[in-house]
Amino acid sequence: MAKFTRRDFIKASVATGIVAGAVAAPALVSPFRRSVLATGNASAAPLPQAITAMSSTFNLNGTPHTVEHEVRTTLWEVISEKIGLTGTVRSCNRATCGVCTVVIDGTPLYSCHMLAFEAAEKPILTVEGLGDGNTLDPIQEIGIRNMAADCGYCTAGWLTVAKTFLEKNPNPTEDEIKDVLAGHLCRCAAYAGIIKTVKDTASYMRGEATL
């Protein structure tokens, strides 16, 4: 009886794999590749070209801006780097801190994790849209009085959200204020001043307080 060694077994396994691969290979060839092999003409089925650049119009604080940008460009990059409204800042760049929040068509969204083209043609509110450029919005004045900012890095995000929130609910409870601002982290821990600012601004909007 012929002796079958471990080396013979390995050789047989390798040979079987090569044959099986050769038989199965045609099934793994893409339809495009098969058409090229059959016709010998690579132009028979041209590959689609990827879209890498586009033009979009962004309605920032009531002013339209038409911008050339890549498809992968985030909304924050368009706002800050292409249009030049630097009030909206970026911190974590992973949609967790709330610093880059803007309000799009009434909804607060993290601009660092939103593709720019998704916000095209929609009304976008940034901190530059508060006040008129020369006069502060009441929530900004009240925020200064209440020491609602230390380093100020998170301020632009929560200001725009709080302003939008109070326009819909001018008489909120403290729990409602905490809930709407829950996505904003303040590394200086100025939360007490922030909440008091929103409450005092609500009182001013109801005509129960003055600046």
Image: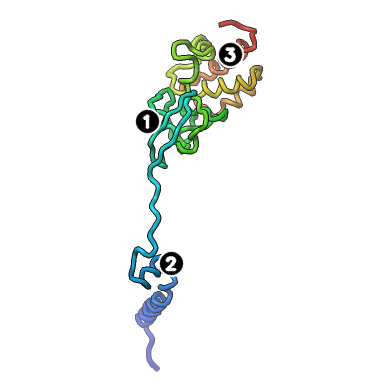
Type of the residue with mark 3: Thr
Above or below 150: residue 51: below
User: Position of 7 compared to 110: left or right?
Assistant: left
Q: What is the distance, in whole Å, between disc 1 and disc 2 at their CAs?
A: 42 Å
Rendered-image quadrant of the C terminus: top right
Instruction: Kindly report the distance in space between the C-alpha atoms of the residues bearing marks 3 and 2.
Output: 64 Å
- Please state if 206 lies on the left or on the right of 64 as rendered: right
Name the one closer to the observer, 67 or 24. Answer: 67
- Report the colour scheme: rainbow
Q: From the image, tell me which residue sits under label 2.
A: 31
Q: Taking 77 as reference, is 132 above or below it? A: above
- Give the percent coordinates (x, y) of residue 60: 47, 26
Q: Position of residue 99 (x, y in %)?
A: 47, 27
Q: Nearer the viewer, mark 3 or mark 2?
A: 2
Which element is circle 3 on? Answer: helix
Residue at (37% x, 89% y) in the render: 3
Decide which of tag 3 and tag 2 comes sooner along the chain.
Answer: 2
Instruction: Name the quarter where the N terminus is drawn.
Output: bottom left
Q: Position of residue 31 (x, y in %)?
A: 43, 67
- For marks 1 and 3, give the one nearer the viewer: 1
Residue 201, label in figure: 3
Q: Who's the residue at 39% across and 28% down the image?
A: 83
Residue 97 visible in the picture: yes
Instruction: Identify residue type, mark 2.
Output: Pro
Q: Are marks 1 and 3 in contact (CB under 8 Å)?
A: no
Q: Residues within 10 Å of mark 1 (few under 14, many from 20)?
A: some
Query: Which residue is under mark 1?
Result: 82
> Image quadrant of residue 166?
top right
Mark 3 closeness class: few <14, some 14–19, many ≥20 residues within 10 Å: many
